[in-house]
Image (cartoon, rainbow, N blue to C red):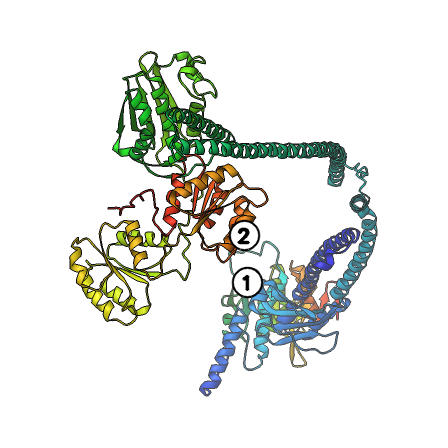
Amino acid sequence: MASQRPRPTLRAVTIVCVAALSLTLCPAASWAQPSPPTDTQVKAAFLYNFGKFVTWPPAAERADQPFVIGILGDDPFGDMLDQMVVDRAIRGRKVSVRRFTSVNDATAHCQLLFISASAANQLPDILRATSRASVLTVSDAEGFAERGGMIGFRIEDKRVRFDINAAAAASSGLAMSSQLLKLARSVVSPQGPRE
Amino acid sequence: MPLLQNLPVKWKLTWFSILSSSIALALACGSFLVYERITFRDAMVRNLSTHAQVIAFNVGSAVLFNDPAAATETLAALRAEPHITAVRVYTTDGKLFASYLPAGPSEQPALLTPAEELRGYRFESKQLVLSRNVIADGVSVGKVYLQSDLREMDERVLRYASIVLVVLLASLVLGGLISSRLQRIISQPILDLVDVARSISTQKNYALRVAADSRDELGLLGKSFNEMLAQIETRDGDLHRAHHELERRVEERTEELRKEILERRRLEQQLRTKNEELETQNRQVEQATRLKSEFLANMSHELRTPLNAIIGFSELMHEGRVGAVSDTQKEYLGDILTSGQHLLQLINDILDLSKVEAGKMEFRPERVQLPSVIGEVREILRTLAANKRLHISTEVDPSVSEVVVDAGKLKQVLYNFLSNALKFTPEEGSIAVRVVPEGADKFCLEVEDTGIGIQPTDLDRLFKEFQQLDSTSSKKYAGTGLGLALTKRMLEAQGGSVRVRSTPGKGSVFSAILPRVAELTAVPVQAFVHSIVPADAPLVLVVEDEARDLAWTTRVLSGAGYRVQGAVSGREAIARIGEQRFVAIILDLLLPDESGWDVLHAIRREGLNRDVPVIVASVVAEKGIGAGFAIQDYLVKPLRADELLATLRSVQRQPSSERPAILVVDDDPKALKLMELHLQQLGCAVIARMSGKSGLEAVAEVPLGAVVLDLTMPEMDGFEFLVRLRQMDRGRTLPVIVWTSKDLTTEERDRLASAAQALILKGQTGAQALLDELKAHLTFAARSAPAEAATMKG
């Protein structure tokens, strides 16, 4: 994934070694990237990771079917996400990425939906649609979490942070792991916003 | 280790128990300690693992969401654990994500090796490094490394160890105390045993015992020890008893021995006294025997002396030498003579018998020709035999014709037998004398007659003294009754025996058996020195090649008082005549190397002996041949001694017509007179002396030719006379003829043999032997009686 500029052989070998080392250390595909990941990359990673810390209601948990991460709106990730989820699992389920154009489509087929900023103006409808299904909504639109989205990305101190609307998640029947909650910048609890 | 070995049992036991218990304790404590440590470590690991697990769990999301701050916050929760020194979270690429270092900055620990990964931890010297995977949703997103110091564990271990040590010490001390008390249970019996053993060996008191109550081995040991002591005690007791018993027995025995010794000594004493008594008795017996022998010897002499006179004078008169006798006188004189001779025989027999009985008879064995002996005895009895017209035959087996035996005694025996035979055989009878071998080493002399024989019942009386078979017949058959007894004794004394066989009316056979070679135990008899030839006697050269002839001539001449030099060849003769001067030379003509005439020439040519008289002795009888030669006389062989001597005398310059006187020394006047008469028959002058002393005076005064000497004289006996005579100048070479009736012992004979020339016994063969002897010594021929020619032995 990392674009490697052509270098002299020694360095290439070293890199190969380091890469091999990294590979031995980590069974999974390494995250070792020569350059710090971009926000988008981070978000993609977060997206994938969110799935690990959320519990869907039993009806939505279907082990035989893959865990679908849907993207509504413009796809900022490209094939980044696709490559990321290759040979990965969320909650023991294979992960696949689908793009949707209609929210109803999306809510019917995915468990985690990323709503891109381009679809932010339809947000209330989307949210209304998703609230009826057990779908974890994530977006990097402004004030997503306050508007009723479950996890909203924020950029803070040049770092990607996120806000969580636990109430929204709870009303959709999704449970958030405390671990996730802990990491959020702010958590809107069902009782009210909480910093 | 010797050090350990020499510790007292008490300390050994104590130390051993201390040692073993301390080892046990140490082992136990050690193992517990180790166990504790292991458990504690495990606990620690678990504890830390738990923490790590929790951290790992909680920090997963932070790692995923790349929130180090949140991770650090989570890590900081471990503040509560004071022993955790560092917590680090690494991402999968090995980069440090977050860390919590309560103990300050520290070195990052070395990552766990794959082997250690399995366990998940590593104990380092001062810390425990634990690692856990941070897992999010079943996937490892990183590692959390915890480091914990081991202080707690060390403290714990230390606490534990000190407790253990304290406990150990306490238990050791306690154990030591207890065991030192308890060891007594074991050591005390042993020490008791030792004490008892020691005191037993010093005091020798085997009655002591050990206390042995316990049922264990010590008790057993004690019991066995006691048993042993009991045995020893009994043995000791037995030993003592035995010892006492032994002592008692020894004492008894000693007492017995003492008594025995005393008894022995007493017996010894008795024995000694007895011995002494026996010795005294022995001496007495010896004395008695000696006295008896002396008595007999003296008596025999005393008896013979007058008999000598009787026989001598009657003989002389009977033979008409002292004047004419009438027939009747002759007859009576003959009776006197025979009676005297008979009496002499009796005396001789008695003497012989007593000598034989006393074992004092001496036998002088010599080589004897039996035929001649028999002939001599027959000759003696010829007249008697002829008177009865008895025929005597002699038969001698050639194998025993020569024997070695005492001739005189044998003649006596034969005379006895033969005279008996003659006596008891009637006229015209025959008597046979036989000699046959008897066994391998004996011979038998037999006399068989055709006489009246002997009754079987009388046979054993025969050989007893004085037993004549018929006392009445003693008148008819004259005899003494001693003969056979003496014969028997004499034969037996020589190792022989006597036998008799008889058939009454037919005849008798008397046999005498003797060894063929008698033991020559007798001291070799010294031959009488025939003459003493003085160193200045005239020297004669005898030239004679025949050894026998030379010996004979030498003997004859020496006997006549000449010194003789012999030469066996002409050359030797010539050599001799050149050496010294001779008074005469007797020359044999037939010499091996040169003829006698040549020798004669040599003699006459020679200077020394040119004019010495030469007498030729030769077998050649031609006296005429020698006439022309310068010889004094010619004698024909075989030579006669008297002729030779006479010729010698005649050729000598010095006249020897002088007839030297003969000295007769005898204390018995009758014997003296007798000898005078006899000697006068010879034509000699007689000087008669009655004592040795006067005899010696006569020797000194008068030149003498010879001496006739009696032995038994008072004051000076014949032996002493001889000794003194030989000390005198004149008497040194004087021929002495001993004429005695004394029975001489061998010792006496030997003494005489060295001093005198001959020994004649009075009475027996008359004076003839004496006269012959005298003649041989005197250097003149007898005037009246023809000299018997001494012929040369062929």
Quadrant (top left/top right/bottom left/bottom right) for the N terminus of chain B: bottom right
* Residue that label 2 marks: B697
- Which residue is more in the foreground, B675 or B390? B675
Does residue B699 lie above or below A138 as drawn?
Answer: above
Chain ID at mark 2: B
Q: Quadrant of residue B383?
A: top left
Disc 2 to disc 1, how far (Cα)? 211 Å
* Residue that label 1 marks: A110
Q: Amino acid at mark 1?
A: Cys
- Which residue is more in the foreground, B50 or B267? B267
- Which residue is more in the foreground, B445 or B732? B732
Mark 2 vs mark 1: give the one in front. 2
Q: Position of residue B270 (x, y in %)?
A: 70, 32
The 10 Å Cα crowd at callout 1, few under 14, some 14 to 19, many 20 or more, is: many
Q: Secondary structure at mark 2?
A: helix
> In this image, A91 relative to B405: left or right?
right
> In this image, B369 relative to B252: left or right?
left
